[in-house]
Image: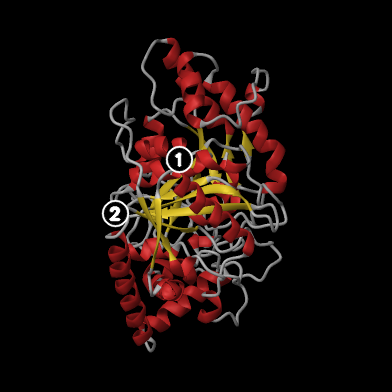
Amino acid sequence: MQPELHGLDAAADVPVRDVTRAPARHLAAAVASGEVSAEEVAVAHLRRIAELEPELHALVGVDGERAIDQARAVDERRRRGEPLGALAGVPFVVKDNIDVSGQTTACGSRAHDGVLALRDAPVVARLFAADAVLLGRANMDELAMGASTQTSAFGATRNPWDSRRSPGGSSGGSAAAVAAGLAAVSVGTDTGGSIREPASQCGVVGMAPSPGLVPVDGVVPFAPDLDRAGPLARTVADVELLLDVLTAAGPRRGGAAPPVPRRVGLIEQFAGARNASGVLVRLDAARACLESAGVEVVTVSVADAPAALTAYMQITSAACVPLMEPYVRTGQAGHEVVRRWTLGRQLLGPDAHLLAGARAVAARLTGQCRAALATCDVLLAPTMPTTAPLLTARTADADDMSLSEMADPLVAPYTDCWTVLANLAGLPAVSVPFGTSNDDGMPVGMMLSGAAGSDRLLLALAAQLESAAE
């Protein structure tokens, strides 16, 4: 299924500049100053979508007519001398599990009722209030169950770096759209790594904010205690700007520079031979970069980290049972949704002892992360143990894939085996691109996590890594 494109012809005569690679903050400043119109920016992105979408398939719906109307309204307000928002004219897309008034929230599934959303999710309303321009809806793993976007009922998204490879998931369409210049920023969701893992695979910045910092109302839930909504962009500064909007904090002007951590803890269990060699090379480079900047890097232990993915799969499978019931009952839900729902019912019934064990693991992980963060400011690890796997790799459709196999960091698509720790332990975390693997030339991300509320601290260190990687 290719996304429908509406409204491009209506503005075909508008002059277009090459703005599809510009940072969001630069676009907003240029629109506010009149250097470029919001309409020009929108049309440029719509044309790029028309050019790349047939192969990329990052989006499942595009409403160009609405986007151009929004852009023209921004331009008219500028002409009248009215103040514009922090994201004036900046094009964005939202993951297909986020409500936009008048659109169907399909969640990458055919098992929805087709009802149109009656109101915008708060994250969307805040973007509109900041004068951002919505282009469309991003593809995703069905009901956020997957790490490759291959479980989408509307077909797989492809990685902009290499169309043979996965963009990650479940926010794979969101990350691919930003990486390919289809949109300047996007909003995804992250229950176990679904923002950070695709950000790593597509070479962009993605953040799972502190629990509760960004509202998840109007987002179709998966495991409510772990679900988060958060930003994806091509630069750390743009993620910070988008986070300001999503939290309704307003842009920070002047004042003291954000702090930079002085002591970073490298998670021992995520730093060894379970990573691909090309990832380890980049991890060593990141460590050297921090040390050369005067940051002390120490090794910390999170002893139960190897058990995190299995615990995550069990906890989320149980949590999703009542939420997925209506979808499964339609008979239209995909294989992975039905598999996870079935597993969850087992865990809530005869296998309740396994669920209790998983919750005990999560509790221990929380304590272990707290202890590690008592000795350092921030935790460091690769975002993923591998780069983006080939789309032809084994997928979650394999009926015989066991929980032990899911915990194997080299079995695709379970490339989120490092990222689930932050969700289970309640930590904010950000993935920042740090070069490419010498194995395959694909992007490698570094993951920074910290205590709840340390989001700005993480972004300050992410900016330092970003600068060193350029």
Label 1 and label 2: CA atoms lie apart by 19 Å
Write down the residue under mark 1.
463
- In the rendered image, residue 169, in percent from the top left (x then y), is placed at 54, 58
Q: What quarter of the picture does the C terminus occupy?
A: top right
Q: Nearer the viewer, residue 330 or 271?
A: 271
Image height of 234 relative to 148, above or below: above
The image quadrant that residue 147 belongs to is bottom right
- In the rendered image, residue 417, in percent from the top left (x then y), is placed at 49, 67
Left or right side of 353 for 75: right
Q: Residue at x 53, y 41 (%)?
A: 468
Q: Residue at x 60, y 72 (%)?
A: 411
Image height of 187 relative to 275, above or below: above
Which of label 1 and label 2 is nearer to you?
A: 1
- The answer to whether residue 7 is visible is no
**Regarding mark 1 in the picture, which secondary structure is present there?**
helix
Cβ atoms under marks 1 and 2 closer than 8 Å: no
Tag shown at residue 452: 2
Q: Residue at x 70, y 41 (%)?
A: 52
Q: Earlier in the sequence, mark 1 or mark 2?
A: 2
